[in-house]
Amino acid sequence: MPRSKAINEPQAVESDAASRSSRGLARDLGADRAAARARLRAVARVRRRYGRLLLALPLLLVVVADVRIRGDRLLDLGGKHIASYLGAMVESAALWGLLLFAASSRRGASRWLAALLFVTLATLSLGGQLYFHRQYATYLNLDATLFGTSLSASLFGQLRADGENFFRSVLPPLVLAIALVWLGRRIVRPGRTAWARAARLAAPAVVVAAFVLPCSYRTVQASTPDVIYFHAIGGLLKELAGVETTAQVRPGLRTPPALPQVAPKPGPRRNVLFILTESVRADAACSARAPVRARAFAGEAPSACPGTPRTDAAVPDRLPLTQMRSNASTTAIGLAVLWSGLQPIATREALHTAPLVFDYAHAAGFDSAYWTSHHMMFANSRLYVQDLPVSHQCGATELDPLADIDLGADDRLLSARARSEVLSLREPFLAVAHFGNTHVPYLVDPEDAPFQPALESKAPDDNEAYRNYYRNAVHRQDAAIAELIRFVRSSPVGERTVIVFTSDHGEAFREHGQLGHTGSILDEEIRVPGWIDAPPGTLTAEEEGALRAARDEPVFHTDVAPTLLDLMGLWEAPALAGYRAAMVGHSLLRPSPGPAALALTNCTGIWGCAFKNWGMMRGTMKLESRAWDTAWHCYDVLADPREQRDLGPAACGDLPRLADAIYGGPAGSVDVPAHLRGLAVGPHRD
């Protein structure tokens, strides 16, 4: 064999082996690439499949949360309300889906803006609605956001008072929103297709649309909670910008007629001090004096009147009105009823032109005063009282320039102001001292807080502790009121001054699911303390007898103005006959003419309702409905003081017929009550 051939054969073998190895490697690499491409295609298919599911997940979470919160009410939806809810679901799906899609992009600054919007809006809308529903058994809507004009002050005051529970409510949506963005960037990862670009451009437009589109928010709230929230905030922004969005009825400037001079009838000479407090329910104070054997001085032994022991001791001979009720659970409405004698269903014009007790006193030559610790900036309340014919007047900012808009000035400052000025009033006089520190967020004295455990937390699990916190606020206020009473009683005018006491309304603590006031006309919100303290000789025997007979009879705030006029000797003045005819109540100094059918509502011509509720009452029978009620409820408040047994509308006799004529039906079946339809504007889908 030639040497060259012998040498080349191994090389050829090696070359063939290398070639075969190279071809094998190429085949292997090709197979690996194919497998990798197959895996990528499989991952892409999984991402597309699960990406779509992820984009739909926010809507699913919203609906599941809504069902858990108010599933029973959703089951009652029918007809147009189902269509409304489905429309809200489409809006919610578009909003959250497009925002999450844009936030899931792999690059670009816009993804961070989209992520910020997604997380912020989800946290506020869902967490905020969860928190609000826990307080009021309904979602925050446009009416509620416009309920007070000084939103920022009220909002920060609320956060100071109950910030912990608010943050507990918003924390789960916050965590879920962040998690969804994190998952979106790993699963959705939108590409650079024309459809993806269009979706990213559409996201801001959908956000803007969420704030302006109409929705069902008022009667049955046939929308998802997030859609109701965005509609409410959008309406508020338009209102703040000067665009009218709905009929937000608030107190305006009064234009009462010029009354003729009137002379009080002959009889006992008496001054009148009307002490009015805020949000104090009947069981938080003592209308009647405790039995002698049960009484003890505060600080020495447990008192038979633990809530208001100092007032209990200051007016031991008061004449109680144990079944006193307000005709509404809103302060502005309560004041109009108490001072004018009109029903809350009177027209806005009537409520702003009717003379008030101050006007009647002025016409009769009485000196007058109105002192209040309430903040007059709240909902422009100053307009209603700025032209009262009084010689002495003050509000929260006159007592404390830094007064809280919800809480007002310290009631001790109000008591001191009244004590410093009451003796300068010319007799006879009518003076009104209006206390306010028992309004949310409640002012308490940690060193004098007998009701324990007490917490500022509004969480449902802390309900009784929160109620104790409220009772401690009543206890603190009691000291300021009692100090004023003792001063007047020990002064030269004390023996000629009749003191009348009540509260503007009560306060709910979830007895029927709601917290606070304005939410219903149930007794926790409208049954209030009431009493009259008259020194010897200031009442005739007949007047005292009538008051004693009224002790346990149902009486109402519509009876207060007639009683004040009677105390001033003006109830029978011929010149006032026309105004007296518009008053449905009667003087408690006279025998009762029998129970009358009276309107109860928080939706009026002087203050629009945040939550629809209305009804009527005659004697002990109450007809009642709230925003979600499509049928009337009837209760006998004497036999069933907790209003747990609905007797059915028929048990209330002709009250359903009368109420239908006034309101148009139960609150859940009527968008705007009949007596307010002339004031109603604004788009909605209810």
Image (spheres, rainbow, N blue to C red):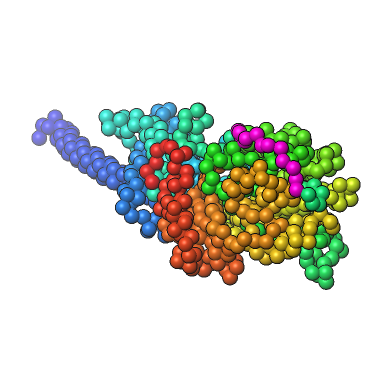
How far from the left and from the top, in percent, is residue 187?
35, 42
**Does the image show residue 559?**
yes
How far from the left and from the top, in percent, is residue 602?
54, 49
- Viewer-proximal residue among 263 and 650: 263
Tell me if 577 is positioned left or right of 568 in this view. Answer: left
* Callout count: 0
Tell me if 358 is positioned left or right of 207 in this view. Answer: right
Residue 588, picture quadrant: bottom right
How far from the left and from the top, in percent, is residue 341?
62, 48
Q: In the displayed image of the protein, which residue is found farthest to the front?
A: 574
Magenta stretch: give its range: 253-265
**Does the image show residue 10?**
no
Quadrant where the N terminus is found in the figure: top left
Which residue is depicted at the point 59% across and 48% down? 581
- Viewer-proximal residue among 316 and 390: 390
Which residue is depicted at the point 41% across and 29% down? 110
Tell me if 53 is positioned left or right of 405 in this view. Answer: left
- 371 up-or-down from 662: above or below: above
Assess whether residue 256 is covered by the magenta stretch: yes
- Viewer-proximal residue among 686 and 236: 686
- Viewer-proximal residue among 118 and 292: 292
- 11 up-or-down from 187: above or below: above
Main secondary structure type of the part rendered in magenta: loop
Assess whether residue 162 is covered by the magenta stretch: no
Which residue is depicted at the point 31% across and 44% down? 52
